[in-house]
Structures are given as C-alpha cells and as structure tokens.
Image: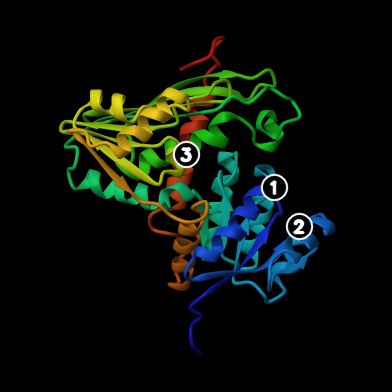
Amino acid sequence: MTKPETIRWGISGTGRIARQFAADIDHAANARLTAVAGRSADKVEAFAGSLAGVAGFPSLEDMITSGSVDAVYVATSNHVHLDQTLACIRARMPVLVEKPLTASLKEALEIRAAARSSGTFVMEAMWARYLPALTAARSAIKAGAIGKVRRLEADIAWNVPYDPANRLFDKNQGGGALHDIGVYPLSLTRFLLGSPGSVEGRWHAAPSGVDMGARIVLNYPGAECVVTCGFDRDGNNQLVIKGDDGVLVLGPLFINANGFAICKSGSVASLAVPGGSSMQARVRRRLFRQMPLPGLAHHPHRFQGSGLQFEIEAASKAILSGLREEPDNTLDDTIAVLETIDAVLARAPQTRPVR
C-alpha cells in the first residue's frame, strides 16, 4: 500500500486560532484541512460551510471515527486539552495541541505517559519555534555569528484590563500570564540555548489569584537569560541575545518575527532596532531598515499568512515519517517549560508588579 503524501487534518474548535490554522494550512505543502468539530452546531456549520471540502462534526469523537482525518489539531480552551488529547491518544490519532499543552504539569505528564504507552504522535503547537526567522537565528547563533552567548533578554507583555470573566484571569480555564504568553519565551530560550542549569523567578497576582506578571531568570554556563511577561503593561516584545561579538534581535513581536537583525553592539541595537510599539520606536525601526548603518545587518525571512503553516508542515512531516514526536519540539521540552512555571508559581507572589 502506498503511503500518503498529505496529512488530512481535522480541527477541534471553531475559535480564532482554529480559523488561523484553517487559513494557514493552504500554505503548507504536505497538509490539507478536511474536517472540523465543535460543541455548537451553528458554529461548526458556519466554519465548515466557509471552506471547500471541509466536513462538520458534532463532536471530536465523531470526527475521529469518521475516517476523514489522519490527524487532529486541538484548538480549544486550555482546560479541555487533557480530555481531548487523551481521546485522540485512545484512538491512536496523531494530535497537535495548541499551546500550552495544558496549564497543569500533572495533566501534561499524564498526556506524555499515555502517548508513549500507546505510541501515538503528540506535539504542542509551539508554532514560533518553526518560523523561518527563529530557525535561521538559531543556526546563526550556533555558527558563531555573535560569538559566545552571554545574555538573553525576552519580554512579552500587553495591557489587558482585568476582568474576572476573562479566561486569562480564570484559574479554572488555565489563565495566567505565564501559561498564556510566558510559555513562548521560555520555550524559545530552550530552543535557542538548550536546557538551563538553574531557574529562579518571582511573580505578582491578579485579584483572581492567577499570575498577572512574572520575571524568570534561567542560568546557563557563562550566560544569564531573563524572561519577563505580563498583562499589566505593554512590553518591548523583543528577544535580544547578546554575545561577545554582537547582538541578535528578534521582534517586536518576536513570536511572529519575519526576520532578525545582527548588530555589532548593544548601542547600535538600541538605536536601530528598539523594542516597543511607540511611534518613535516604529519610525526608527523603519528608518534603519532602509538606511545602511555600520554594524547593522538585517536578515529578512518574510512569509505569507500568520505563520502556523510551518508547525503544520513539521507535524505533518513527522507523522508521515512515522515518528512519535517532532524531534525539535519534544514532550520532554514542553514539560520542562511547565516545570519551570510550576516552580516559580510555587513561590509566594510579590505584592508589587515585577519587571
């Protein structure tokens, strides 16, 4: 029997990220969308009806057993990831789970154990790892483009007015800044530099008790990495890596970077590629992309769509190859990030915002 060359994907969920996946899969070489499932019949009908060749199903189980999909993308809220992922694993159905894999370390460990016991492919949809700019930046660092890495600084934050009804502030729905956005820089730090030697951190709480913001320091041999995140401010949303011979800058917004810059010094980086969304910062970044400046080199890696196609391609390739995990994004790596978050949140919260 000839092996398939394309993975037929089904989506569980009909929200914003599900629609991004549906749009970006058209840019993936080895995948196509064939089905969607959800709790609301009207939303499923509207979702499927807007896309050619996509069937709608009233439940994840119905979609899995329909014979119309080879893999499932779980695009639902954090608090139902466990049940839906385990349902896929029981059916031996490869599954890509929107980040975070879960907002609970215990649940993530349960998923890993079930996946490895059954031999089912499971991958967290940490899509930023697969952006061309991120993979190229990692290659540049490994090739010595900035020399020995001494410091990494990653900040991701945007101001979200507190609302106890918002899932971001609801612990029962997996809320909190670290699980929602802090996972990005923590995962990318591991992607770029590997496992840290030690971790320390602090956080402050929203009125509902979830983390409103946090600061984590990851220590590497000869290098320090500082990760900050929050819903209480607008951050610089950059990832900056400082080495003995230069500085590499991703973003803003680094989780959707379409290129990176290598600067000879920190002063050049501050001048030509400042972080933040202020008018002054935007003008300077635009100006220095067009105007040559000694000690500054831009490396564009533009793409169509919103960028999810690269993780779709990676997951599809791994599944087609018969792998149980994607080698550049293993469940061990996912769980290591959740262990870091758990260790930080186990500490008593600070009374004031942390930066």
At mark 2, the secondary structure is loop
Say what amino acid the circle numbered 2 marks. Gly
Q: CA distance from mark 1 to mark 3?
A: 20 Å
Q: Is residue 270 toward the left or the right of residue 102 in the image?
A: left
> Is label 1 or label 3 in front?
3
Q: Residue visible at 55% across and 40% down?
A: 105
Taking depth in this image into account, of 38 and 18 the one nearest to the observer is 18
Q: Residues within 10 Å of mark 2 (few under 14, many from 20)?
A: many
Rendering coords of residue 206 (x, y %): 64, 19
Taking depth in this image into account, of 38 and 61 the one nearest to the observer is 38
Please give the residue where the numbered disc 1 appears in the rendered image. Answer: 80
Say what amino acid the circle numbered 1 marks. Val
Asked whether the residues under the numbered discs 3 and 2 touch, taking CB atoms below 8 Å apart as contact, a structural biologist would say: no
Q: Is residue 220 toward the left or the right of residue 339 in the image?
A: left
Whether residue 346 is visible: no
Please give the residue where the numbered disc 3 appears in the rendered image. Answer: 184
Say what amino acid the circle numbered 3 marks. Tyr
Rendering coords of residue 144 (x, y %): 17, 43
Q: Residues within 10 Å of mark 3 (few under 14, many from 20)?
A: many
Rendering coords of residue 262 (x, y %): 25, 38
